[in-house]
Image: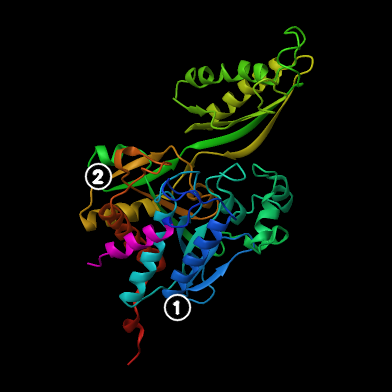
Amino acid sequence: MIKANKHRIQTYIESLARFTATPGNGTTRLSYSKEDAAARRYIKQEMANLGLSVREDAVGNIYGKLEGALKNAPAVIIGSHFDSVPNGGSFDGPAGIIAGLEVAALFQEYGLEPQYPLEVIAMIEEEGSRFGGGVLGSRMIAGQITPADLYEMKDSIGLSAAAAMEKLGFNAADICSARRTGNDVKAFLELHIEQGPLLEEGAQDVGIVQMIVGMTEIRITVRGRSGHAGTTPMEGRADALAAAVSILNELPGIASDESDLPVLTVGKLDVLPNGANVIPNQVVFTVDIRSANSDTIKRILRKIDKLVADAERPGISLSIDELLYAEPVEMSANIQSLLIGNCEKLGLRYRKMVSGAGHDAMIFAGFTDTGLIFVPSKDGISHTPEEWTDYAQLQKGIEVAFETIVQLTEAKEKSSNTEM
């Protein structure tokens, strides 16, 4: 039985972790940053070392391809993202890319030739930490983003996604060339750390995801009027923060009122001009809503619309922008079946799961057969420097992924194709 190389897996993880803007305080690797550029050089070099043909698409997603015996056949893709949240961990995203690299390494070491091409992918901006919205790399692959969108998306200093990618040599105008469809992608498989405690608490090796919950992210902007904190009477103030608080105070209850236990998070809040003695003239905050029921998400959004409308008054105006909307999606039943069979073949303990976190897999599921594997997270912790998955557990998940990729690519030993 083929075993993944734990030492090589550890080397990949630790090497990628070096490319961070916050050494000693976790991983901060924003898309199109100098840390992104350094990480992509490393990823491309490792792909080339494995004999893969390497390319970057128009927006910066990285591919390493092992050609298949069938000409012009759709590819089987494995991978994840290499951006991070600020001060995040070393495993969220990179674990899935390392899974792809290790699978490619095992194909080479054991002389396996895929009938369908094998592609390892490393995607940008899954977290949405720089431009908001999330899963941007895969949404561009799916054709859900336009060049105009990339000019409208801005980072914290007002630089557009289009301008940021241009600095690294990519071109928003060519975004259509990054599109993939079911015609050229046979299947997509992603390995990810669980980011929760269930596998560890259950002493289980692998999570097989059946569904990813639906999610939306909106941005609410409240505009008022600045004034001196000491000389402006309370009556007649247009305090943007006071208006924002009237909404923020109601949001948790909106989610709690729903019977199917959705979750709602205000994760980012900016107050301008952010002076201790100045009345705020603008407040911008994000609202993240997640549920396995799309009707619940829509109902919550309608309630938020009403809250925003009710907060309007003289001097105060509000607006809502949708940054991301994704319906709940089911993973491929066929790939789930293959994953279960391979867990049993390898003697691994597994459980079927619903993912409360969003992943690139939910976007790929819109146009091709898709599978998602979880491996345990220590103490269920993620998005912090303390994020950790034991390398032995990562090795087990990669071995399940390898066996499944062998089946999906219909790989054979090269010698078996030699005619006598």
Determine the residue positioned at 58% across, 59% down.
181
Determine the residue positioned at 66% across, 54% down.
164
- Residue 17 locus on image (x, y percent): 42, 55
Determine the residue positioned at 69% across, 50% down.
150
**Magenta span: helix, strand or loop, mainly?**
helix
Answer with the quarter of the image where residue 242 lies. top right
Q: Quadrant of the C terminus?
A: bottom left
Mark 2 Cα shell of 10 Å, populated few (<14), some (14-19), many (≥20):
some
Determine the residue positioned at 69% across, 54% down.
162
- Residue 42 locus on image (x, y percent): 47, 66
Disc 1 residue type (three-letter): Ala
Instruction: Check the image and name the residue furthest to the left.
Output: 347
* Left or right: 307, with 62 as reference point: right
- Residue 233 locus on image (x, y percent): 75, 8
Mark 1 Cα shell of 10 Å, populated few (<14), some (14-19), many (≥20):
some
Answer with the quarter of the image where residue 98 lies. bottom left
- Point out the stretch of residues depicted in magenta: 1-16
| Cα distance between the residues tagged 1 and 2 | 37 Å
The residue to which callout 1 is attached is 69
The residue to which callout 2 is attached is 204
